Image: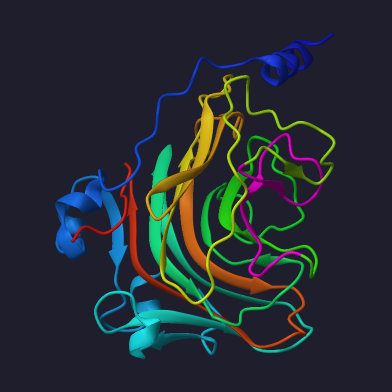
């Protein structure tokens, strides 16, 4: 057996010690800045946008589908202040990907918090990416690379989103993490659910280590503003100490430790985005709103009063 094979076998079988407890509730950065006022001055904060000034392209590095990514001002579609961002996928069979993208300089741990609301009548089945996205993308490959496996050197991706595979599941579907990682099961990302279920090949157990704590699979509410937060922590190359965690309204709803996300320490988290992608939207026109975004290197938590 070659050295490379031995190293891979060690990575696949190794287990890390018990992961440190994660914070919950109003104990994060936002608790020190009521209404997020001044939070951008905190040394742990990388970026903040409340969409109160200008257009999305003024503060974000890329906007996909500018004609359907718009500023919203209707009171019911704004979380804080007087404006939010609205993403729309018209009723159509063709795939459409709305997104605002922020380039980051490269970090090992990033937290992304945002308030978001689904249309009260949101109704979509099948392929959709409709939430918060963090990624490490090698500069040697293009930004958008669906269908290309993560190999430990090219990328790793986590999207905190909803998955609805059939009409029997209530809309918008169960919260999960869509993840590209070196041990992924197909050419497209795995879906990690809070309970530990992994799609595809659900008969295979997820490799989250012996201390993984299964949680209830849940779905967000339609037509209501909720606080979403995603943490991505890159592993130390050669160890399984990577971690992805998710909060809803300050409650830790998913925690996936013992992850191998990369094999080289030069691959760092350098992209963040908010998305509304739908593969086949033939049921109805669907909308989603985002507001009060903060990206930081430590837990942010819900907005303080």
Q: Measured from the top left, where is residue 116 in percent x and y?
A: 44, 69
**Residue 83 is drawn in which quadrant?**
bottom left
Quarter of the N terminus within the rendering: top right
User: Is 183 within the magenta?
Assistant: yes
Total numbered badges shown on the rendered structure: 0
Q: Image height check: is 10 above or below 46?
A: above
Q: Which residues are magenta?
A: 169-194
Q: Measured from the top left, where is residue 115 in percent x and y?
A: 39, 66
Name the side, left or right, on which 259 lies relative to 190. Answer: left
Q: Residue at x 63, y 22 (%)?
A: 209
Q: Image height check: is 18 above or below 231?
A: above
Between 272 and 305, the residue placed more toward the observer is 305
Between 157 and 89, the residue placed more toward the observer is 89
Q: Residue at x 52, y 67 (%)?
A: 221
Q: How is the image coloured?
A: rainbow
Quarter of the C terminus within the rendering: bottom left
Name the side, left or right, on which 136 lies relative to 46. Answer: right
User: Is 56 within the magenta?
Assistant: no
**Residue 81 is drawn in which quadrant?**
bottom left
Q: Main secondary structure of the magenta part?
A: loop
Q: Residue at x 54, y 87 (%)?
A: 68
Q: Residue at x 77, y 82 (%)?
A: 94
Q: Image height check: is 120 above or below 269?
A: below
Q: Image height check: is 101 above or below 13?
A: below
Between 128 and 55, the residue placed more toward the observer is 128
Between 235 and 114, the residue placed more toward the observer is 114
Q: Measured from the top left, where is residue 288 in percent x and y?
A: 52, 77
């Amino acid at each position: 057996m070659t050295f490379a094979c031995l190293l891979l076998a060690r990575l696949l079988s190794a287990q890390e010690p018990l992961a440190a407890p994660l914070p919950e509730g109003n104990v994060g950065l936002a608790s020190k800045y009521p209404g997020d006022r001044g939070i951008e001055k905190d040394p742990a904060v990388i970026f903040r946008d409340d969409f109160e000034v200008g257009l999305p392209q003024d503060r974000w590095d890329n906007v996909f589908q500018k004609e359907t990514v718009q500023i919203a001002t209707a009171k019911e579609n704004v979380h804080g202040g007087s404006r939010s961002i609205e993403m729309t996928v018209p009723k159509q069979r063709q795939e459409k990907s709305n997104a605002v993208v922020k380039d980051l300089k490269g970090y090992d741990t990033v937290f992304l918090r945002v308030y978001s609301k689904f249309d009260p009548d949101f109704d979509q089945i099948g392929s959709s990416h409709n939430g918060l996205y963090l990624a490490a993308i090698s500069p040697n490959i293009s930004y958008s690379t669906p269908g290309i496996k993560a190999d430990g050197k090219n990328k790793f991706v986590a999207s905190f989103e909803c998955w609805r595979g059939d009409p029997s599941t209530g809309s918008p579907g169960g919260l999960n993490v869509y993840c590209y990682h070196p041990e992924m099961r197909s050419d497209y990302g795995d879906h990690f659910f809070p309970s530990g279920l992994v799609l595809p090949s659900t008969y295979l157990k997820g490799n989250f280590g012996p201390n993984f704590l299964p949680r209830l699979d849940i779905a967000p509410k339609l037509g209501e503003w909720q606080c979403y937060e995603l943490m991505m922590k890159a592993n130390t190359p050669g160890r399984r100490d990577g971690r992805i965690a998710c909060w809803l309204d300050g409650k830790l709803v998913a925690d996936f430790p013992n992850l191998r996300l990369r094999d080289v320490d030069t691959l760092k988290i350098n992209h963040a985005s908010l998305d509304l992608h739908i593969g086949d939207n033939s049921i109805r026109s669907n909308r989603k709103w985002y507001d009060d975004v903060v990206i930081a290197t430590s837990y942010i938590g819900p907005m303080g009063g």
